[in-house]
Image: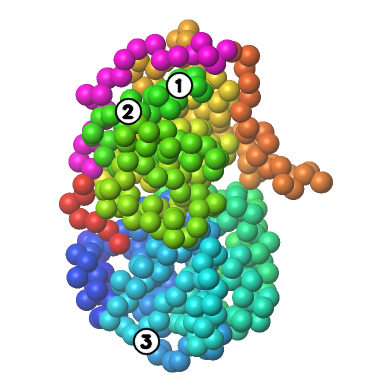
Amino acid sequence: MTTFENLGLHAQLLKSLSAENYTAPTPIQAQAIPHLLNGKDLLGIAQTGTGKTAAFALPILHRLAADKRPAPRRSCRALILSPTRELASQIAASFTTYGRNLGLSVATVFGGVSAGPQIRMLAAGVDILVATPGRLLDHINGNRAKLDGVEIFVLDEADQMLDMGFIRDIRKIVKTLPHQRQNLFFSATMPKEIGALAGELLKNPVEVKVTPVAKTADRVEQHVAFVSAGDKRSLLVKLLNDRNMDRVLVFSRTKHGADKIAKFLADAKIEAAAIHGNKSQNQRERALQSFKNGKTRALVATDIAARGIDIDAVSHVVNFDLPNVPESYVHRIGRTARAGATGIAISFCASDERGLLRDIERLIQQRVPVLEGYAPIGGDTRAEPAAPQQHRRGNAPQQPGNKNRRHRGNRPQYNGADSRKERPNGELNRMNFMKPSGRRPEQARP
């Protein structure tokens, strides 16, 4: 059995891991860390919740601690790019936890907060900088940051960067990096654009894959409820009336929709909060903290949180709206069943979302079971999903003048049915599925 001691990590890192009761590395940690300690570039294909952050944080801390030197002014020694503020904060917190005995500085740069403290921090220099692309590029363009001192560059959640439109910013940032550096590239999926970017950044990389691309978490029990759009909020309240749903992440397609859902739940006396891009950083942090400490049972989020929330105890994920991009379904339901736990995902499907459900089932190559009592009118006539087509997202050639329309083919298709007639045709059987079995892991993993 591989242990962290076998990997040859710095003694102070082992001390910190022991204090956190981490003894055995996850598969991606066991595979990636030896190569990273040897200075190799790495391409990692891994879902969230697999221990990916520690897979790059531990060797970075080891390398910087073994070669102590002052951080370059207006720069950093290690740069990690993250798609969201929440994920950036969590990555920085992991570096702080693992490296607390090493005396290395860790800082974050992202939007939604005052730039003043960031400017002062950059002026002094920092060992490890975790940043979102937009705000970091603002500092670079304002001559407040330069990246010529970067020794290690990490691009995390690259496919989400693509979905959020950050690829151009990333290329601009990369142009300011020194030619000699170690590059780490992580993505849960590998569409064509991301594969091309990896080819530009990496030099003779080691490739590590710990799960099949777009594979849903094995410990997530999935259900779909066929329900009219107008009845979704009532069904959500009905589900949340069961106290076994003690920490629930609800996904909405839009920011306005997330606010409306949270208000509806609050009016129904269910503790709820919304988190999305229009919220200030303080509002988002308060909502997350309330959710983490159990004061809020339901956190309603847009896809900005699909890979930016790292809370092991999420019992359920509810897809109030099915995502337009089927890969987002995998990342959404991956917010539960983390760190060895089990979890439950329930997706609401209205008439105009049938096409989205077919796309999801084609991607995951399985049919999502129907929640008891919520079959479609006329019965469940879905065919077993075929394998993904070659022209799926990421494989299709880009058409001239159509660069920003990658997902058009995945939008809901109205099938002519009257959604008002598609109402729940039975009562909810809560006994069998509302309570995940064995949710709490015996030992959390880094």
Q: Is residue 331 visible?
A: no
Location of mark 1 (residue)? 231
Q: 21 or 206, which lies in front?
A: 21
Image quadrant containing the C terminus: bottom left
Label 2 to label 3, Cα distance in Å?
Answer: 53 Å
| Picture mark count | 3
Mark 2 belongs to which amino acid?
Answer: Leu
Image quadrant containing the N terminus: bottom left
x%, y% of residue 12? 26, 80
Mark 3 belongs to which amino acid?
Answer: Ala
Mark 1 belongs to which amino acid?
Answer: Asp
- The magenta stretch is 418-439
Which residue is at 32% across, 52% downward? 290
Front position among marks 1 and 3: 1
Q: Say which label, 1 or 2, has the lower sequence index.
A: 1
Based on the picture, tell me whether residue 347 belongs to the magenta stretch: no
- Label 3 secondary element: helix
Front position among marks 2 and 3: 2
Which residue is at 45% across, 92% downward? 70
Which residue is at 27% across, 58% downward? 445
